[in-house]
Image (cartoon, rainbow, N blue to C red):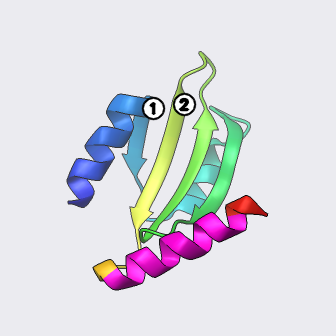
Amino acid sequence: MPEMRRGLRRARRGSGSNQEDVDRGFGAREGGTGQPVMPPGDMFWGDRIAELQRPLGKPWVLAKHVKDLSPTEMKKAQDEFLAKMKK
């Protein structure tokens, strides 16, 4: 399933990269080969993600799967995320 998510992300958003350390990858590319769009952060589905914009304008998503969640845990995390977005 993570491979499918990565493939969809690449097709939809530009380039993607599965990183062992998203924070380090973000820091290494920030300013040099990309401008920050979204700093590294943990997502409710269990990935840590960051996004940069490459010099020619294409987005570059760095991701690492960090936590496996049960369907119940993911639903709870999703509901919490959506509640924060409404504020």
Q: Quadrant of residue 13?
A: top left
Name the amino acid, label 1. Arg
- Left or right: 71, with 37 as reference point: left
Residue at (52% x, 57% y) in the render: 49
In this picture, is 31 found above or below 72? Answer: above
Q: Quadrant of residue 34?
A: top right
Between 87 and 60, which is closer to the camera in this rendering?
87
Residue at (53% x, 72% y) in the render: 79
In this picture, is 17 found above or below 68? Answer: above
Q: Are marks 2 and 1 in contact (CB under 8 Å)?
A: yes
Which residue does the numbered mark 2 point to in the structure image? Answer: 59
Q: Which residues are magenta?
A: 72-84
Q: Quadrant of the C terminus?
A: bottom right
Between 58 and 24, which is closer to the camera in this rendering?
58
Between 85 and 66, which is closer to the camera in this rendering?
85
Which residue does the numbered mark 1 point to in the structure image? Answer: 13
In this picture, is 69 found above or below 4? Answer: below
Membership of 33 in magenta stretch: no
Q: Secondary structure at mark 2?
A: strand
Residue 33 seen anywhere in this rendered image of the structure: yes
Mark 1, Cα crowd under 10 Å, few <14 / some 14-19 / many 20+, is: few
Where does the image place residue 70, in percent across and percent down from the top left?
30, 83
Name the amino acid, label 2. Pro
